[in-house]
Image: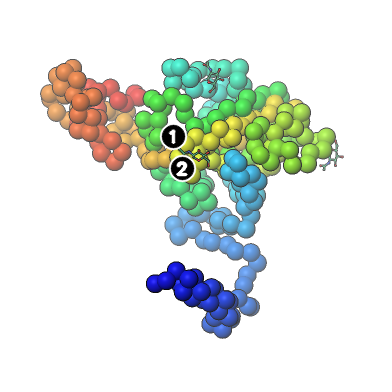
């Protein structure tokens, strides 16, 4: 079809369609309309529904969004309660080795929940998947963080520099950061390189650190979503972000990092009993088969390897 004809037909359809809508769906457009738009999750596990009308875009470069009242007060309290007695000093990933190390760059304390630890966590994980349109299995388990007076996390990236940390799940594509408490002063999440940094009005209630970028004030129940990768899957250097020092009060947050692929540890290694399925595994591993024939030996996403023990691919 001639493209001009196609275009004019298309425009014609566009100009007609509101009328069609009004004629055919009076109920939907009229009295049936409820307050806002509220989608129920089909899984039925979510206690609070996913409501897109509560989402605001705050920055396009990097892509960042805020969902107000993403968590209920009860959910915030519950997450803090699960973490309270189990906090340990937070670590960072070392650039060179890929190992977790302590650092003055990050002075909070934290712990990881288990995936689907209980019904509340299941509901939150499902809501995150619904909001981000990213599969649940691509998420790491939720990390709870506690920042006391003066504690902070210097600006950093969430994508993983070290290749070894990308073996499971690949790059981190997005982060959902949920605020479990209000913070009297300080503790803002700051994006020092966001394009919106110069246009965000800030009065004296913002910390000096927050003034150095686009900043988000922790508000109990709110969630911040930002992407560490561009749509073309390259790393977004504007996604640099940090947690400003807490000046007054303390800060609780929960983080869900989401990868480009499934982050499910295979069932065998989760149990800690990483096994060899064949008596020749040790011999094959010694002769280099783990590298030469990784799919059979080590497995991959969704495929359990046959010689995981001898190839030493399980953490425990
Ligand atoms: C890690 O990499 C960042 C830049 O990506 C750099 O600023 C920092 O100095 C590096 N740290 C170490 C310990 O090499
Ligand atoms: C800023 O903080 C002062 C107290 O330091 C308070 O009186 C004022 O209402 C705050 N302003 C805003 C916009 O929150
Ligand atoms: C990927 O997208 C970013 C942002 O639009 C752009 O700056 C970059 O050049 C792109 N890279 C490639 C390899 O397409």
Q: CA distance from mark 2 to mark 1?
A: 13 Å
Which residue is farthest bottom?
A: 23
Q: Residue at x 19, y 20 (%)?
A: 288
Q: Quadrant of the C terminus?
A: top left
The image's colour scheme reads rainbow
Residue 202 vertical placement versus 290 (above, below): below
Q: Nearer the viewer, residue 16 or 269?
A: 16
* Total numbered labels placed on residues in the image: 2
Q: Which residue is mark 2?
A: 232
Q: Residue at x 61, y 45 (%)?
A: 60
Q: Which residue is mark 1?
A: 171
Q: Is mark 1 within 8 Å of ligand 3?
A: no
Q: Residue at x 29, y 41 (%)?
A: 302
Residue 304: percent from the left, percent from the top? 25, 36
Q: Residue at x 79, y 38 (%)?
A: 202
- Mark 2 residue element: loop
Residue 100: percent from the left, percent from the top? 47, 20
Task: Identify the image quadrant of residue 43.
Answer: bottom left
Mark 2 Cα-neighbour bin, 10 Å: few <14, some 14–19, many ≥20 = few
Mark 1 Cα-neighbour bin, 10 Å: few <14, some 14–19, many ≥20 = many
Inspect this view and state whether residue 223 appears.
no
Inspect this view and state whether residue 243 appears.
yes
Task: Identify the image quadrant of residue 163.
Answer: top left
């Amino acid at each position: 079809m001639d493209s001009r004809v196609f275009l004019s037909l298309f425009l014609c359809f566009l100009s007609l369609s509101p009328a069609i809508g009004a004629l055919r769906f009076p109920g939907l457009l009229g009295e049936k309309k409820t307050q806002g738009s509220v989608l129920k999750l089909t899984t039925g596990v979510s206690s609070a529904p996913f409501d897109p009308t509560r989402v605001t875009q705050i920055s396009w470069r990097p892509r960042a969004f805020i969902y107000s009242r993403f968590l209920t007060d009860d959910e915030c309290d519950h997450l803090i309660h699960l973490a309270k007695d189990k906090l340990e000093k937070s670590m960072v990933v070392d650039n060179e080795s890929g190992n977790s190390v302590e650092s003055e760059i990050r002075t909070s304390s934290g712990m990881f929940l288990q995936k689907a630890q209980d019904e509340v966590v299941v509901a939150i994980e499902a809501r995150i998947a619904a909001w981000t349109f990213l599969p649940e299995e691509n998420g790491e388990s939720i990390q709870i963080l506690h920042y006391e007076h003066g504690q902070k996390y210097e600006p950093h990236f969430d994508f993983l520099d070290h290749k070894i940390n990308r073996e499971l799940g690949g790059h981190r594509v997005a982060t959902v950061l949920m605020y479990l408490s209000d913070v009297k002063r300080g503790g803002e999440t700051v994006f020092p390189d966001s394009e919106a940094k110069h246009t965000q009005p800030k009065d004296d209630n913002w910390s000096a650190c927050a003034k150095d970028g686009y900043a988000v004030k922790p508000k109990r129940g709110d969630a911040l979503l930002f992407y560490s990768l561009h749509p073309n899957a390259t790393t977004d250097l504007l996604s640099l972000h940090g947690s400003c020092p807490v000046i007054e009060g303390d800060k609780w947050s929960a983080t869900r990092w989401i990868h480009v692929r499934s982050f499910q540890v295979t069932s065998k290694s989760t149990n800690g009993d990483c096994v060899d399925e064949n008596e020749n595994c040790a011999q094959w591993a010694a002769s280099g088969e783990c590298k030469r024939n990784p799919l059979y030996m080590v497995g991959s996403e969704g495929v359990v390897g046959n010689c995981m023990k001898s190839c030493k691919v399980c953490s425990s």
